[in-house]
Image: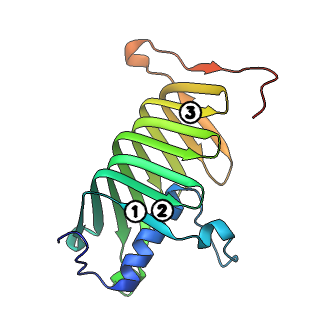
Amino acid sequence: MRFFSFSMSVPMRRTVLACAMGAVLGLCLVGPAPLSAAEQAPINIEANRMVSQENSNSVVFMGKVVAKQGGMTIRTDEMTVHYSDSAGGDKAAGQLEKLVCVKNVQIVQDDWLGTGDRLDYFAKQRKAVLSGNAKAWNGPNMVSGKTITYYLDEKRSVVEQDSSQKGRVRAVIRPGASQ
């Protein structure tokens, strides 16, 4: 598929892009709760190329990918959105399963910044895993490790060490600094 020449239906394209961005940004809601202003903000994805792979239920954005919604921005070299068919096989009603960003991943929102070589978001578990020299800053404070796993529903994160290189988890906390 050529860039800006979509063969998928408009409702499917909106569903895939909205769920992908909302999921990765932690903005997708489970259930019929009303959408917040941030969730209703337009989702803008720019890349050098986009390929829809309907047979494998995925859409790939390649080359200087920038995805924005509200105050959140994701930058990466490549973003792949994996989705499932609905129960009736209707691709337009497909649900996000997984989102993968690879190479030079950067996520920014307000004074929070996360970086790494890869980001995997698992929709059913509502879990995001930043890996490969993963680092996260909240204002002046920083944490780093091999992986940073964030559980959206629990608002809990786990930072793992790189045991193969005898690496350790590292945190820099600046007491008294505003966050």
Q: If the image is split into quadrants, where does the N terminus sit?
A: bottom left
- 31 displayed left or right of 168: right
Numbered disc 3: secondary structure: strand
Residue type at mark 3: give it.
Answer: Ala
Residue 172 location (% of width, % of height): 64, 19
**Relative image position of residue 5 (x, y in whole percent):** 22, 77
Residue at the disc numbered 2: 21
> Which tag, 1 or 2, sits closer to the chain's start?
2
Q: Nearer the viewer, mark 1 or mark 2?
A: 1
Spatial CA span between label 3 and label 1: 23 Å
State if disc 2 and disc 3 touch (CB < 8 Å): no
Residue 71 vs 159, above or below: the answer is below
- Amino acid, disc 1: Ile
Along the horizontal axis of the image, is 40 left or right of 116?
right
* Relative to 130, residue 52 above or below: below
Q: Residues within 10 Å of mark 2 (few under 14, many from 20)?
A: many
Asked if residue 69 shows in the view, the reply is yes
Q: Earlier in the sequence, mark 3 or mark 1?
A: 1
**Which quadrant holds residue 17?**
bottom left
- Residue 17 or residue 47, whichever sits in front: 47
Between residue 70 and residue 151, name the one nearer to us. 70
Circles 1 and 2, Cβ within 8 Å, touching? The answer is: yes
Q: Which mark is residue 45?
A: 1
Classify mark 3: residues with Cα within 10 Å, few (<14), some (14-19) or many (20+). Answer: many
- Residue, x 70% and y 21% (percent of image)? 173
Residue 87 locus on image (x, y percent): 41, 83
Residue 123 appears anywhere in the view: no
